[in-house]
Image (tube, rainbow, N blue to C red):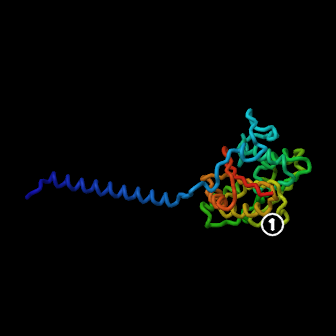
Amino acid sequence: MTVSPFLFWMLVFLIVVFALAFAAALSYGLRQRVRMKRRPNFSKPPVPHVAIDTWNEIFHSTGLGPNRDSEIAFIGQSGALASINDTETWVLGALAKTTKRIFEFGTATGRTTYVMARNAPDGATIDTLTYLADGDDTYEHNKNDPDADKWRKIALGESHYDHFYYEDTPVAGKVTQHFGDSAKFDETPFAGQIDLIFVDGAHSYSYVKSDGAKALRMVAPGGFVLWHDYSPRCPGVFKALNELGRELPLAHLKGTTLVAYRKPA
């Protein structure tokens, strides 16, 4: 039986189309399989979302709005580099009102330092840690961290300040500025003594783990540790806190990228 050239080439065309479609479907399936393997598979979120007004009594709603105990002296986010948002500013400022000793990993511009100092009571002290402005050689670059080069550049870029927002203000006397690599920072003089710790330093996984471990050793009974930038956009922070959330009762405060922990009294 002789097959016409038209039918022959039509058959070849259909075979090629089928092969290409099969290859595309196989490639898509493999990509989906890899993506699903990379996606965390938690039976429940390791860091549950918690409404701010139910997380701590200072934020309890009156039915008409936030409790007046949470009122703070406030500076907005607009125009600030490497800054927390306005809700996060409110949370940290309100908590600072109840503290005597505060420690901050990651000074950046010093705006958040100022807000905490401005709201902390008379006699309160704030220690804040940042890299030296020329501290490029001190950064403990861990090449095993995801996107290590990217987060190294961001950390150093946010640490180039040698003048800070809180300086030349009435609360500057509350603040002690420390310079250096947080991975090398000796936290033992602060162990068990700090009422409020804000962790917002380098965002690579190894640094978040190191800073968090130090913060947990430094926090006083009944004190608070808060981490910033809990989001898949910051995979080092996200991974480290998801892991820690399996060990400690952390809370992701709704409407923020803050994760909070309160040490039992």
Mark 1 closeness class: few <14, some 14–19, many ≥20 residues within 10 Å: few
From the viewer's side, name the closer residue of 91 and 261: 261
Viewer-side residue, 16 vs 259: 259
The residue furthest left is: 1
Q: Position of residue 40 (x, y in %)?
A: 55, 58
Residue 223 vs residue 102, the one in the foreground: 223
Q: What residue is rendered at 85% in x and 65% in y?
A: 189
Q: Looking at this rendering, what residue extends furthest in the top direction? A: 64
Residue 84 placement, left or right of 173 = left
Amino acid type shown at disc 1: Asp
Q: What element carries label 1?
A: loop
Residue 170 visible in the picture? yes
Name the residue at 72% across, 53% down. Answer: 260
On the image, which quarter does residue 131 sit in? bottom right
Quarter holding the N terminus? bottom left
User: In this orientation, which residue lies closer to the viewer: 157 or 45?
Assistant: 45
Please state the horizontal and vertical placement of residue 74, each as a whole percent of the image: 79, 40
Residue 224 at what x, y percent from top left? 77, 54
The residue located at (83%, 56%) in the rendering is 127
Quadrant the C terminus occupies = bottom right
Question: Can residue 151 be seen at all in this image of the molecule?
Answer: no
Residue that mark 1 sits on:
186
Q: Residue 86 appears in which quarter of the rendering?
A: top right
